[in-house]
Image (cartoon, rainbow, N blue to C red):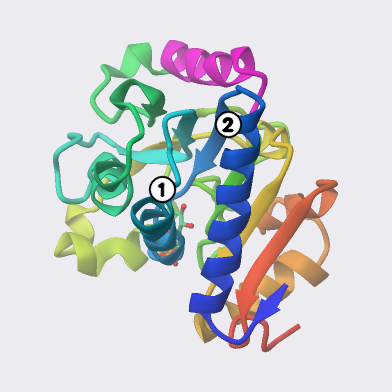
Amino acid sequence: RIFANSKEASGAVAKEIADLIRKKQKEGKSCVLGLATGSSPKTVYAQLIRMHKEEGLSFKNVISFNLDEYYPMEPDSIHSYHRFMKEQLFDHVDIPKENYYLPSGTLPAESIPDFCTSYENKINALGGLDFQLLGIGGNGHVGFNEPGALINSRTRLITLDHSTRAAAAMEFGGLHKVPRKAITMGITPILNARRIVLLAWGERKAGVIRQSVEGPVTEHVPASYLQAHPNVSFVVDESAASEL
Ligand code: GLP
């Protein structure tokens, strides 16, 4: 779906999420969301906050699971995805504290595999993700499933790609300060979501959007795995669509 700009696109995505939350509320059910970080979803979160304030959209029935977190990473660090989510969404809406989950960046290494299994188990026990929001890295990663990630990959500790660390270097104040590892939901739990929306804005994403949508399904471009999903939308602005 190609929109004139990211603002219009984000409005449409926020509306879809809000409609889903309200529908689930009417049914007396939880709404299980998979959430993403990065700059792309910020405008969607801003719209959701606006709908909470202006339209009374409630997040009391929302349970959310974030895709990834750097490892190691303290939750209150300015670089942590925990902090990002609080600042960009959770602190501004009425989601109960016990309803949102992110991979932990502070676990001892030996307990990471068990943590990852229980993260997926929690999602499955709730009946799976109703909706998964995604961004896309310049190298085609989704979450932190870097090129080479397999279609049957599970939630796990990964080694970040050099290009991913280089893209984050400015924000961290130097490449050497960017963590080398991260915990990410795998491709399998992402593809298990009943609905997936991937966001991409700007010309710098045009090449990887073309590869993901029109190229072969390949581990070299993990976002291309989404082609196999029955209910996925790539929501892009005109610049990100310019090579389609
Ligand atoms: C990071 C995140 C991804 C995100 C990507 C793109 O690597 N782990 O989930 O999609 O950045 O970020 P942006 O939206 O800022 O381009």
Q: Quadrant of residue 187?
A: top right
Q: Is residue 124 magenta?
A: yes
Using the image, determine if residue 125 lies above or below residue 145. Answer: above
Q: Are marks 2 and 1 in contact (CB under 8 Å)?
A: no
Foreground pick, 23 / 146: 23
Foreground pick, 128 / 112: 128
Give the labeled residue for mark 1: 56
Mark 2 C-beta to ligand 1 under 8 Å? no
Q: CA distance from mark 2 to mark 1?
A: 13 Å
Q: Residue at x 28, y 39 (%)?
A: 82
Does 193 sit left or right of 47 as displayed? right
The amino acid beneath tag 2 is Gln
Q: Is residue 1 at all visible to an observer of this figure? A: yes
Q: Which residues are magenta?
A: 113-129
Q: Residue at x 71, y 44 (%)?
A: 195
Image coordinates of residue 61 in percent, x first then y, are 48, 28
Does 22 sit left or right of 223 as displayed? left
Image coordinates of residue 113 in percent, x first then y, are 46, 16
Does 77 sit left or right of 162 as displayed? left
Foreground pick, 20 / 64: 20
Q: Principal SS element in the magenta part?
A: helix
Instruction: Report the quarter where the N terminus lies.
Output: bottom right
Q: Which mark is residue 25?
A: 2
